[in-house]
Image: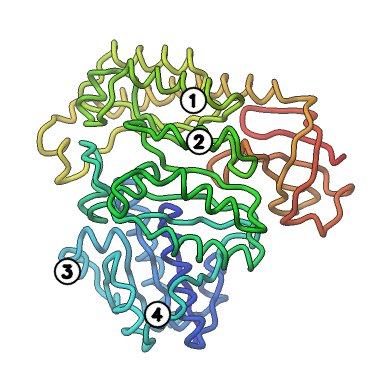
């Protein structure tokens, strides 16, 4: 039997998929890579791990379902299963509106989906994963759900309350990954800085980093999805003092205006946000900050948007992404605010923000020309080596591109030193030294 599992949405979904794949693999299934075309793969079962976060993600998931169902009609696929956030959020509606799916399952229904495929869940391999990333890096999901109440966000209603994974279990999982050759762990959750409050009655991200740093073979620990309100100071101290913890922080700030932040229910105002960024820069010299902003949120007028532009211009984030506000049903924002900003205005604000950030990113990258940096080689393709330093994370950031002729193929998945020779707003070019 052949299985193809298609993962949509975030890296947290990817971890869930990798755990499921290991269960199928243990049961004797042949795992078909998700990028392989259906007409070539001809899998017996296709399982889609869906995203239901915002409208664009929901649309992508629905389109993927119909693509697979069309392949089923052509006889290329025998069974289609749908699970994850979209089917969790619309448990009643999806079976009524989409015909041909052999089973819809929620985000926490792994055992039920396995049973539908004739597989009995094996708890003895619950920490094992069939990695879908290159073998030298992996995501480590440290908690599930979220206790925050951001006005625009549907995640708590989909994934439930925050539940931390016990530290010993995370250390064991990380050790298994290190034993398989993983060198970089990317810590993920809905809110990594909340880790431990439910289990230990205090924030434990810092102690977790220290435990993970002790694992032989793990060279980089990278923090994603942190939250600005009540950010734990000890994490900065560990980042500054531990070479294994990348001086890189992904922290979605979402806005700079106190008015908008209050309407978002972010638990922090504009002044405290500015003070927090100043604290990051002072505590960890050279830190690379990746953030995300939402434009067009209810309450954002011309003044508030100008405040956001001024904030980004002043604080010059090395990495910044943005979304236009998407009203999601049953969120506080949808129930209590009017989504009155026209789509055209939202798009104009998005374009203006990203144009500003493009200039900032270019200037930052150009400042690195001539420096020597330690990089991790991700892949070789078309005569080019694709690598990252601790300043670049997976998927969301640019790459360091190196002519492959001078780099031994054995360097894939390993560290080497390069000299940066050129830069644009996204990627850098370097030479192997």
Image marks 2 and 3: residues in contact by CB distance under 8 Å: no
Which quadrant of the figure contains the C terminus?
Answer: top right
Q: Nearer the viewer, residue 30 or 151?
A: 151
Question: Residue 417, position in %: x, y?
Answer: 80, 41
First in sequence: mark 1 vs mark 2: 2
Q: Which residue is mark 4?
A: 123
Question: Residue 226, position in %: x, y?
Answer: 41, 39
Image marks 4 and 3: residues in contact by CB distance under 8 Å: no
First in sequence: mark 4 vs mark 2: 4
Graded by Cα atoms within 10 Å as few (under 14), some (14 to 19) or many (20 or more), the crowding at tag 4 reads few
Label 4: element kind: helix
Q: CA distance from mark 4 to mark 3?
A: 33 Å
Graded by Cα atoms within 10 Å as few (under 14), some (14 to 19) or many (20 or more), the crowding at tag 1 reads some
Question: Residue 307, position in %: x, y?
Answer: 35, 13
Q: Which residue is mark 2?
A: 249
First in sequence: mark 4 vs mark 3: 3
- In the displayed structure image, the side of residue 426 where residue 431 appears, left or right: right
Give the number of the disc on residue 96: 3
Camera-side mark, 3 or 1: 1
Q: Which residue is mark 1?
A: 280
First in sequence: mark 3 vs mark 1: 3
Q: CA distance from mark 1 to mark 4?
A: 41 Å
Graded by Cα atoms within 10 Å as few (under 14), some (14 to 19) or many (20 or more), the crowding at tag 2 reads many
Label 3: element kind: helix
Taking the view exactly as shown, the residue that stands out farthest to the left is 336
Q: Give the vertical position of 111 relative to 263 (above or below).
A: below
């Amino acid at each position: 039997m052949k299985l193809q599992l298609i993962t949509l949405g975030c890296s947290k979904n990817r971890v869930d998929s990798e755990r499921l794949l290991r269960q199928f693999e243990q049961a004797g299934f042949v795992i078909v890579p998700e990028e392989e075309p259906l007409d070539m793969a001809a899998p017996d079962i296709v399982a889609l791990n869906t995203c239901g976060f915002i409208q664009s993600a929901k649309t992508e998931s629905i389109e993927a379902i119909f693509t697979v169902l069309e392949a089923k009609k052509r006889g290329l696929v025998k069974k289609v299963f749908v699970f994850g956030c979209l089917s969790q959020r619309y448990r009643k509606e999806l079976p009524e509106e989409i015909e041909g799916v052999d089973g819809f399952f929620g985000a926490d229904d792994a055992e039920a989906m396995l049973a539908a495929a004739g597989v009995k869940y094996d708890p003895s391999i619950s920490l094992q994963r069939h990695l879908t990333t290159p073998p030298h890096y992996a995501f480590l999901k440290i908690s599930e759900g979220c206790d925050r109440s951001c006005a625009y966000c549907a995640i708590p209603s989909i994934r439930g309350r925050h539940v931390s994974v016990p530290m010993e279990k995370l250390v064991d999982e990380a050790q298994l990954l290190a034993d398989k050759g993983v060198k970089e762990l990317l810590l993920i959750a809905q809110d990594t800085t909340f880790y431990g409050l439910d289990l230990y009655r205090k924030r434990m991200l810092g102690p977790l980093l220290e435990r993970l740093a002790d694992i032989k073979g793990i060279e980089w620990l990278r923090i994603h999805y942190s939250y600005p309100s009540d950010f734990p100071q000890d994490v900065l101290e560990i980042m500054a003092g531990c070479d294994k913890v990348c001086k890189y922080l992904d922290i979605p700030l979402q806005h700079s205006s106190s008015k908008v932040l209050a309407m978002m229910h972010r638990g922090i105002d504009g002044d405290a946000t500015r003070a927090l960024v100043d604290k990051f820069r002072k505590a960890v010299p050279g830190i690379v900050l990746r953030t995300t902003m939402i434009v067009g949120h209810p309450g954002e007028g011309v003044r508030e948007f100008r405040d956001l532009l001024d904030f980004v211009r002043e604080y010059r984030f090395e990495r910044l992404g943005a979304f236009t506000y998407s009203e999601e049903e049953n969120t506080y924002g949808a129930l209590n605010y009017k989504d009155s900003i026209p789509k055209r205005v939202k798009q104009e604000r998005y374009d203006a923000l990203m144009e500003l950030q493009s200039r900032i990113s270019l200037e930052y990258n150009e400042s690195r020309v001539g420096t020597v940096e330690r990089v991790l080689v991700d892949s070789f393709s078309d005569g080019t080596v694709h690598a990252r330093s601790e300043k670049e994370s997976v998927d969301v950031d640019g790459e360091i591109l190196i002519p492959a002729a001078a780099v031994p193929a054995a360097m894939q998945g390993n560290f080497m030193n390069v000299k940066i020779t050129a830069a644009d707003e996204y990627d850098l070019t370097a030479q192997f030294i």
